[in-house]
């Protein structure tokens, strides 16, 4: 089991999750999004299920694997790609910006067709 970053992270990438991960298992694509979505990913074999990242994500983009909403189920495989193509990724560097407002979070949900 592992925690999963969903598409709600796309273009947000504020790295609040990476700031609280004790094992540095949250990655970004080296050189920016070229092959994969512009988001961070959790290495499923390195995540120790500490739970830190889920509440830390201001965009509410992270879910425990069993609780990933149906609309984001493909994210489980998209995070798995880390293990299969680790050469394309590097541990995410922390560069936190201002937290989004509740309206911005709601607008991001809507953009992705997600109703919590
Ligand atoms: S805290 Fe959430 S939105 Fe920010 S980079 Fe991590 S998963 Fe993406
Ligand atoms: S649950 Fe813990 S170990 Fe897993 S990605 Fe989140 S912060 Fe890192």
Image: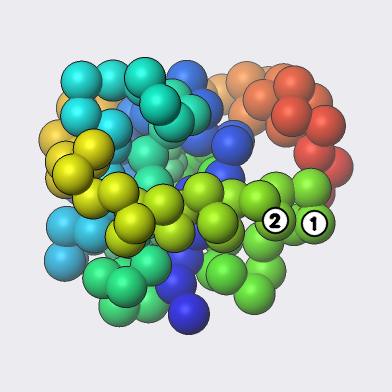
Residue designated by label 1:
70
Q: Residue 89's spot in the image, x, y percent?
A: 22, 40
Q: Residue 16's spot in the image, x, y percent?
A: 31, 41
Q: Nearer the viewer, residue 99 or 114?
A: 114
Q: Is mark 2 within 8 Å of ligand 1?
A: no
Ligand number 2: quarter of image? bottom left
Q: Residues within 10 Å of mark 2 (few under 14, many from 20)?
A: some
Above or below, comparing residue 10 to residue 114 in the picture: above
Q: Does dot 1 land on a helix, a strand or a loop?
A: helix
| Disc sitting over residue 73 in the figure | 2
Q: Residue 6's spot in the image, x, y percent?
A: 57, 45
State which quadrant residue 80 falls in.
bottom left
Relative to 115, is 55 on the left or the right?
Answer: left
Cβ atoms under marks 2 and 1 closer than 8 Å? yes
Q: Does dot 2 land on a helix, a strand or a loop?
A: loop
Residue drawn at 40 percent across, 26 percent down:
35
Residue drawn at 50 percent across, 34 percent down:
9
Q: CA distance from mark 2 to mark 1?
A: 5 Å
Relative to 83, is 80 on the left or the right?
Answer: right
- In the rendered image, is residue 79 in sight? yes
Residue drawn at 67 percent across, 61 percent down:
68
């Amino acid at each position: 089991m592992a925690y999963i970053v969903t598409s709600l992270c796309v273009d947000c990438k504020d790295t609040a999750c990476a700031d609280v991960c004790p094992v540095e298992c949250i990655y970004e694509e080296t050189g920016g999004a070229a092959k994969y979505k512009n988001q961070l990913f959790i290495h499923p074999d390195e995540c120790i299920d500490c739970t830190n990242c889920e509440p830390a994500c201001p965009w509410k983009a992270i879910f425990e694997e069993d609780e990933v909403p149906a609309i984001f189920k493909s994210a489980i495989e998209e995070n798995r790609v880390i293990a299969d193509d680790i050469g394309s990724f590097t541990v995410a560097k922390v560069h936190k910006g201002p937290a989004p407002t509740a309206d911005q979070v709601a607008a991001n949900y809507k953009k992705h067709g997600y109703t919590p």
